[in-house]
Amino acid sequence: MEVLGVSRPPVAKMRRKYQEHKDGKGVELWQEAARPGQPGKVDSRLTAHGAGSACSEAPSGAARWTLEWIADRLVDLNLGDTISRERVRQALQKTSSSRGCNTGGG
């Protein structure tokens, strides 16, 4: 615990995983198993179209795109029934673009 700078629970968990798989056949102790639950809502199409919108010319009368406008545009493109500002933010965060960029990097 001192060497790694972690508390007792992570060490106990790793020790338990090691004991369960002590044969060592292809066990990756550092990888976590897939967790159940709803899959992520930000896919590559949303990311690509969101970045494309952010880097296109802003709507008339605006200096740049807002997250709300990008979300509305993505709904208009039938990429979802509703798309939140947060989903747009997460999608844009996966790229190097910024709203209103003229080049790929912002």
Image (cartoon, grey):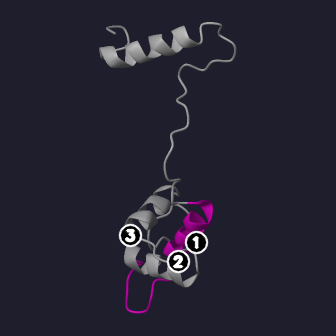
Mark 1 touches mark 2? (CB < 8 Å): yes
Secondary structure beneath dot 2 equals helix
Asked whether 38 or 83 is in front, the reply is: 38
Q: Amino acid at mark 3?
A: Arg
Residue 74 tag number: 2
Label 1 sits on residue: 49
Disc 2 residue type (three-letter): Leu
Tell which tag, 1 or 2, sits nearer the viewer: 2
Please tell me whether residue 91 is drawn above or below residue 102 in the rendered image: above
Name which residue lies at 53% across and 11% down: 18
Residue 55 counted in the magenta span:
yes
Label 3 Cα crowd, 10 Å radius (few <14 / some 14-19 / many 20+): some
Residue 98 percent across, percent down from the top left: 45, 65
- Place of residue 59 in the rendered image (x, y in percent of width and height, measured from the top left): 45, 88
Q: Disc number at residue 103?
A: none
- Tell me where residue 11 sits by quadrant: top left
State the mark number for residue 85: 3
Look at label 1 and name its amino acid: His
Which quadrant holds residue 60? bottom left
Q: Which residues are magenta?
A: 43-65
User: Is 1 inside the magenta-drawn segment?
Assistant: no
User: Residue 38's x, y, as percent?
Assistant: 50, 53
In the foreground, 43 or 38: 38
Q: Earlier in the sequence, mark 1 or mark 2?
A: 1
